[in-house]
Image (cartoon, rainbow, N blue to C red):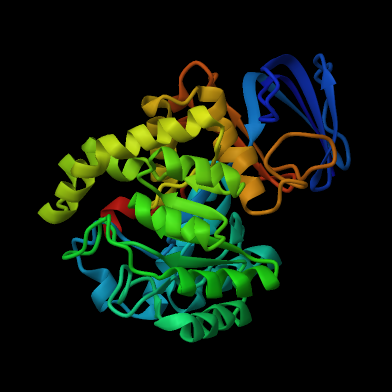
Amino acid sequence: MRTYLTNFSLIDCTGAPLQENMTLVLEGDRILDIKSGSLPFLPDKDNQRVLDLKGGFVLPGLWEVHTHLGDLIPDPHNYLETESIIEYTIRAGRNAIEALKAGITGIRTVGDAAFVDVAWKQAFASGILVGPRLYVSTRAISVTGGHGHGTLGAIEADGPDEMRKAVQDNLDHGADLIKLMVTGGIMNEGESLEESQLSLEEIQAATDLAHKHGKHVAVHAWGAAGVKTALEGGVDSIEHGLLDDEAVEMILENDAFYVPTICCTQDEEFYAQENLPDYQVEKAQAAAQAHREGLLKAYKAGVKIACGSDSTPTAEFTRRELEHLVKAGMSEMDTLIAATRTSADLCETGSDLGTIETGKFADLIVLAENPLLNISHIREVQMIFKGGNLIDPSTPEGQADFFELFC
């Protein structure tokens, strides 16, 4: 089918400024043409539809590149300790589908149990159900007793040989990338954000094998010392990261990406509303200023920043992450690029996705208002296209709310 979108302003996320009064032609799952000016509003014909967007704003579909589809933070009903893997799987899929309905057309998972993310990736790719494009890490890898042990289906591996076995097992099960837990974190009691848990030799063993298979390595790394060790070990993206000047310089030198997950330390509303353990709130608040300052250092230095929230439900927290990136000091345009072009590049799909250009997949959203004036306008999604197909964003009558069910 050929689809004409007309009478809108375009934010193509290539770095070009907003373009007014545009027409976009979609053919099948690709963008066929981009034209200046509006078409006459002609009636739909066989294998053709014309949609007057009435002054809306078109931009690429959003991305979320740091999420755990089956995770719950907080988990007041203790589901993660009591539910079956079948129940976990159902919730993970519901989370992904609702993300697409919010305009998030691409998701990179960084740790889920039992290869659930692989199963949902295959289900969406085959058309069994309609969901976002998934780029999956399968299980995270930690040291014995390290950050993430006992959750997210993490593999515990000690020493280079065990690390290589863990990486290979994930690759054999369909991992698109490898996720390592390099430092302590906010969610585990009894560990600090600064402590390093993986050795340089373990990180190198993982990255060498992953790169041999053409796969990226993402690392959970809060403390600057752990960030630097990870970069010395050849990793491709730093997730979280309390960055100092040297860490920023090393990211640039290694041509790595930075996924700040800034809402993890900045979302005071979340801390106030949810019954999080005191130790989690205290660690997040203690890191907030350094986290924000490190993000600004990276931004001003030209580091490649991508959008990930590390929180569930994905639909809500991806939007919060974008809002917090702007609050922290990024421009609205650069924030949108982080959530589109740069995130697609991180997933090595930039040749097909992440911007609105002729020949690329027709993954795009239509907003009612200009997000360059207020980033929160990303919440006002009027239309979503994935591969040229118009997605129904409505909630079926009788379906329970995700927050009410799980949070």
- The quadrant in which residue 87 appears is bottom left
- The quadrant in which residue 169 appears is bottom right
In this view, the residue farthest toward the left is 278
Residue 203 lies, in percent from the top left, at: 49, 69
Would you say residue 236 is visible in this rendering?
A: yes
Would you say residue 101 is visible in this rendering?
A: no
Residue 158 lies, in percent from the top left, at: 39, 82
Q: Is residue 190 above or below residue 240?
A: below
- Front in this rendered view, residue 396 or 142: 142
In this picture, residue 400 sits left or right of residue 133? left
- Front in this rendered view, residue 26 or 54: 26
Question: Which quadrant of the rendered structure holds the N terminus?
Answer: top right
Task: Residue at 59% x, 60% y: name it.
Answer: 134
Q: Is residue 5 above or below residue 282?
A: above
Residue 362 lies, in percent from the top left, at: 74, 42
Q: Is residue 157 above or below residue 406?
A: below
In this picture, residue 338 sits left or right of residue 113? right
Label count reads 0
Task: Residue at 47% x, 52% y: name it.
Answer: 238
Question: Which quadrant of the rendered structure holds the C terminus?
Answer: bottom left
In this picture, residue 352 sits left or right of residue 171? right
In this picture, residue 198 sits left or right of residue 203? left
Residue 97 lies, in percent from the top left, at: 52, 55
